[in-house]
Image (cartoon, rainbow, N blue to C red):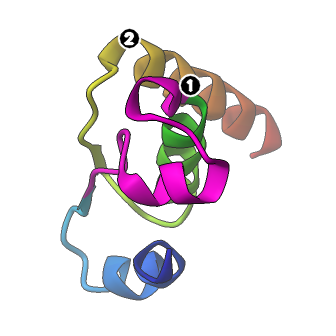
């Protein structure tokens, strides 16, 4: 979580940032979930990472992550 919070500082370097939170144990510790039940947490972290400057998301759940990213982008387009 510290790295997620610090992503904006890494993004200032101007290089594309890759993140991978998919099914990680920290999600299990935070939510008390087994790996096969961590998709909602993985999606939340993926969107948060994009908001903080990540450019590439590594995931096990490509379709669900792509849907979450599409919704986030559509929402951001409306805000801007």
- Which residue position is annotated with label 2? 63
**Res 53 quadrant in image:** bottom left
SS for callout 1 = helix
Residue in the image at 50% along x and 28% along y: 39
Q: Which mark is residue 68?
A: 1
Q: Mark 2 or mark 1, which is nearer the start of the sequence?
A: 2
Q: CA distance from mark 1 to mark 2?
A: 9 Å
Is residue 10 found inside the magenta-colored segment of the image? no
SS for callout 2 = helix
Q: Is residue 50 left or right of residue 40?
A: left
Q: Residues within 10 Å of mark 1 (few under 14, many from 20)?
A: some
Residue in the image at 42% along x and 88% along y: 9
Asked whether the residues under the numbered discs 1 and 2 touch, taking CB atoms below 8 Å apart as contact, a structural biologist would say no
**Res 15 quadrant in image:** bottom left
**Res 25 quadrant in image:** bottom left
Image spot of residue 59 (x, y percent): 28, 33
Residue extending farthest to the top is 63
Residue in the image at 78% along x and 33% along y: 78
Residue 42 lies, with reference to residue 8, above or below; the image says: above
Please name whichever residue, 75 or 4, is drawn nearer the observer in this view of the structure: 4
Please name whichever residue, 62 or 55, is drawn nearer the observer in this view of the structure: 62
Residue in the image at 81% along x and 43% along y: 79
Image spot of residue 46 (x, y percent): 47, 45
Image spot of residue 13 (x, y percent): 25, 85
Q: Is residue 7 left or right of residue 14?
A: right
Residue 11 lies, with reference to residue 74, above or below; the image says: below
Magenta-highlighted residues: 19-39
Image spot of residue 38 (x, y percent): 50, 34
């Amino acid at each position: 979580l510290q790295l997620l919070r610090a992503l904006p500082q890494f993004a200032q370097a101007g290089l594309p940032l890759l993140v991978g939170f998919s099914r990680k144990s920290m999600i299990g510790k935070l939510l008390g979930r087994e790996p096969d039940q961590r998709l909602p947490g993985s999606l939340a972290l993926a969107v948060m990472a994009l908001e903080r400057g990540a450019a590439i998301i590594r995931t096990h759940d490509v379709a669900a992550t792509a849907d979450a990213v599409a919704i986030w982008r559509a929402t951001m387009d409306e805000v801007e």
